Image (cartoon, rainbow, N blue to C red):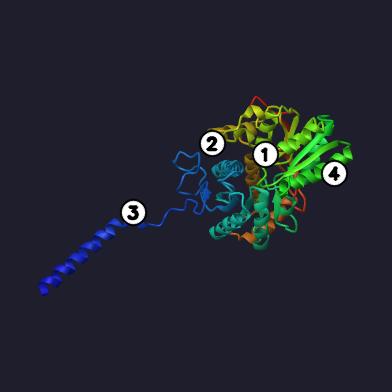
Amino acid sequence: MKKVLSLLLACALLLGCLAACGGNDTQQPAADNGSNGSAANNGSDAPAEGDDGGSDPAAPSGDAFKLGGTGPLTGSAAIYGMAAMHGAAIAVEEINAMGGVQFDLKYEDDTHDAEKAVNAYNALKDWGMQLSLGSVTSKPCEATSAKNNADRIFGLTPSASSTAVLDGKDNMFQMCFMDPNQGSASAQYIADQSLGTKIAVIYKNDDVYSVGIYETFIEKAGELGLEVVSATTFADGSDTDFSVQLTDAKNNGADLVFLPMYYQPASLILAQAKGMSYEPKWFGVDGMDGILTMEGFDTSLAEGVMLLTPFNADAEDERTQSFVSKYQEQFGEIPNQFAADAYDCVYAYKQALEAAGATPDMDAATLCEKMIEQFTSMTFDGLTGESMTWDATGAVSKSPKGMVIQDGAYVGM
């Protein structure tokens, strides 16, 4: 019996050793590579999209400010989220290489969904986010901006343009134009350039971005004497067939159609208009910036489309060309205004942090008060505008640029 017990004990010990040796590779904690759909552009062991997997030049050299944002990194609006993340990553890489202020950047995927955006925000808060890039698109940012305000984490969104993002929140700021500004500026530009005599508008009635631009466009058009002969709408579930809207515009003699919307429905409208031999002038807004890189889209359909945007990738200044060159090298495409606005956000943070004498050991609430003070008093020059300022509501003041698509590229008008 003693021999049997000894043999059994020896076998048990041997099996335990084998299990311990074989478990090292599977039971180690995973490296932080942006779990729950996140993408960390620096300070992560997983290469971001466009990275060759080598050493990360954006990694901070010392103590760093934790900078987080949410955006659609997957799904139908991923062009916007990926562009913002990539633009911010290039800025962080450049700034960290300078020494001085250092950033640790982390993005979480919100798939352009408000509820998922809140979950993504909470993950960033748990990570220790001290400064926020808000959310990329408007509806998610309306939800996360409420969290920013309650938690006293300062937010600077590159592209969420809804007025509700700022309303009642002293610590939420925008790098992009507000929806009302886009609507009125578009009407003013159309009138000043005599682009159309009879105007049609097609807008998305369940999207705060589209509705906000439409309402201010109509108001300004009335002031300027622009004749709006057709105003039709669509919503989720009815955004694949635009024959009714286009027929109404065509039958009313509209020679210019204004499209305050994102690029996905706009791409279908352009294709269906061609199919019915309707060839008005087309005028869009910054949400259409990205249509040229939309997978499967015939870019010839967008030839001649005009829009207002704060960024011109063809600009000849050295800073813009450097950014465009780096973006193309790393991500294989020309950056849109979402990328440029996010790039500017990071540099605006750098300027404000330096002016405030802020240090990474400060908590988010302390940094929040310092950022409010700086952003409401400073002037900032960036890729998307010169001499930019912010008022107490968080709205930015800068001038839009008129662009037209020619030969598959944006060209200044």
Mark 3 or 4 closer to N-term?
A: 3
Mark 3 or 2 closer to N-term?
A: 3
State which mark lies toward you, 2 or 4.
4
Query: Is residue 293 shown left or right of residue 207?
Result: left
What kind of residue is marked 4?
Glu
The answer to whether residue 287 shows anywhere in this view is yes
Where does the image place residue 213, in percent across and percent down from the top left? 76, 44
Mark 1 or 4 closer to N-term?
A: 4
In terms of depth relative to the viewer, which is nearer, 123 or 206?
206
Residue 41 badge = none
Residue identifier under label 3: 25
What kind of residue is marked 3?
Asp
In terms of depth relative to the viewer, which is nearer, 405 or 362?
405
State which mark lies toward you, 3 or 1.
1
Mark 2 or 4 closer to N-term?
A: 4
Residues at badges 2 and 4 in contact (C-beta under 8 Å)?
no
10 Å neighbourhood of mark 2: few (<14), some, or many (≥20)? Answer: some
What kind of residue is marked 1?
Asp
State which mark lies toward you, 2 or 1.
1
Q: Identify the residue shown where x is 77% and y is 41%.
A: 232
Query: Is residue 167 shown left or right of residue 147?
Result: right
- Distance of label 3 from label 1 (alpha carbons): 52 Å
The answer to whether residue 383 shows anywhere in this view is no
Residue identifier under label 2: 331
Residues at badges 3 and 2 in contact (C-beta under 8 Å)?
no
- Distance of label 2 from label 4 (alpha carbons): 40 Å
Q: Identify the residue shown where x is 81% and y is 35%.
A: 199
Dot 3 falls on a residue whose secondary structure is helix
- Distance of label 1 from label 4 (alpha carbons): 28 Å
Residue identifier under label 4: 219
Where does the image place residue 285, in percent across and percent down from the top left? 72, 38
